[in-house]
Amino acid sequence: MVNIPKGTKDVLPSDSYKWHAVYKVIDKLAKRYNLKEIMTPTFEHTELFVRGVGDSSDIVNKEMYTFLDKGERSITLKPEGTAGVARSFIENGLFNNAMPLKTFYKTPCFRYEKPQAGRLREHHQFGVEMFGSDNPESDIEIFMLLNDFFNEFGISPTFSINYLGCKECNAVYKDKLRGYVKPYLKNMCPDCNNRYEKNVLRVLDCKSRECQSMLVDAPKLSDNLCTTCAEKFGKIQETMQDLGLRYRIDTNLVRGLDYYTGVVFEILNIDKTSGQTALGGGGRYNNLVEDLGGKSTPVVGFGLGIERFILYLESIGYVFPEENNVDVYVASATNNMSYILNLAKSMRNAGLGVETDLMARGLKAQFKYADKLNCRFVVIVGDDEINAGELTIKDMKVGTQERIKEGRLVQYILERL
Ligand code: HAM
């Protein structure tokens, strides 16, 4: 047999209810925050991600699923959602809408990573991209939204936050950091040597212990912001405190994608076995739309990994609401197939979940199956009942059995559910 590709996962029928629980909360928040869903293709021209996500990122350097299509175009399966949404914003003139334009998406993402618990080659993200506002209110709205999302599952998240600064103060800081890092370079990992050339900020989140030990005394982003950026970061923190949004400043947090410009953040899960992983992360990126050929537009957003979030919920013993789709099983003791199917149809039309016998089982085996389905009612139909215009109905919860007029069936069930 052909097995599933490494780093991918099936969501089995017995598990999909967990995804539905998460997606329901997303839809609920979309209503509360006036988010409009955007769906962009699963693949894009490779250049979009090289320009958008950035060629100093691990994503672009090592992890993209890139191939030539039959027309010899370089195509990439989207490794993240932001670049495609920004492209769509420009290409479809979405900037003509009243601002802010608040979009959300649920999308598969593909990254050629070393698979492990919570790290897949195909994962799914819930993402939000909010276009048009450069005010701290919009940064805060993103934090509030994510906070509400976690609260819906009984969790109070802590945001790790940092501030990258505008083009000007960022450039000054990068020079300082380069000056600090240079003498250590020969002892730093090859990745950091590459980062030094392409985007020195990214040495700050190198996972190597040796590199980190050399960075202990490196200048801090937060100490090098210009007055405007420092004020904005201060305002964000002050408002987070006022609103009871929990945060801690992580001076080394720069995120693994090159497009960020202002506030950046992650929500971390610290797990005994798999260590520290980010459940979600994001930030402000005010240059991306312009870099991709659009009109300068401030944007802030985040992405949250659905698989990681579900794993996390399981690890804390969260009980997902069960979905019981079957209200009624129609047990057939007749050859009158049309009668059975019509009866099922009338109940389904009334919104009930109905199963009938599709396996030509005997009555006893049908009851056993109905039991497995855990359905509330079993309706028994034999020729005798059909001729009399009546049905036998068993309430599996209460344990009663009655014979009722066929026309009363739906009402009878609805009254008792
Ligand atoms: P990211 O931090 O690369 O950001 O990914 C967002 C989230 O996706 C991560 O926090 C993690 O939960 C999940 N994730 C990433 N890679 C994997 C993987 N290999 N397996 C399982 N889950 C994974 C972005 O992608 C940005 N586009 C977020 C953003 C939107 N920033 C602004 N707007």
Image: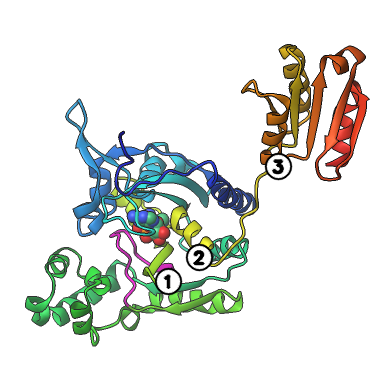
Marks 3 and 1, Cα distance to the nearest angstrom? 36 Å
Residue located farthest toward the left when viewing the structure as drawn: 186
- SS at mark 1 in the image: strand
Residue 132 seen anywhere in this rendered image of the structure: yes
The disc labelled 1 sits on which kind of residue?
A: Asp
Marks 1 and 2, Cα distance to the nearest angstrom? 9 Å
Q: Determine which quarter of the picture holds residue 162.
A: bottom left
Quadrant of ligand 1: it is bottom left
Which of the two discs, 3 and 1, labels the residue nearer the N terminus? 1
Disc 1 target residue: 271
- SS at mark 2 in the image: helix
Residue 176 seen anywhere in this rendered image of the structure: no
Which of the two discs, 1 and 2, labels the residue nearer the N terminus? 1
The label on residue 374 is 3
Q: Nearer the viewer, mark 3 or mark 1?
A: 3
Disc 2 target residue: 315
Q: Nearer the viewer, mark 3 or mark 2?
A: 3
Q: Magenta residues?
A: 252-271
Q: Is residue 258 magenta?
A: yes
Which of the two discs, 3 and 2, labels the residue nearer the N terminus? 2
The disc labelled 2 sits on which kind of residue?
A: Ser
For ligand 1, tell me if the residue under mark 3 lies within 8 Å.
no
| Residue at left offset 25%, top offset 83% | 219
Find out whether the residues at labels 1 and 2 contact each other: C-beta distance under 8 Å. yes
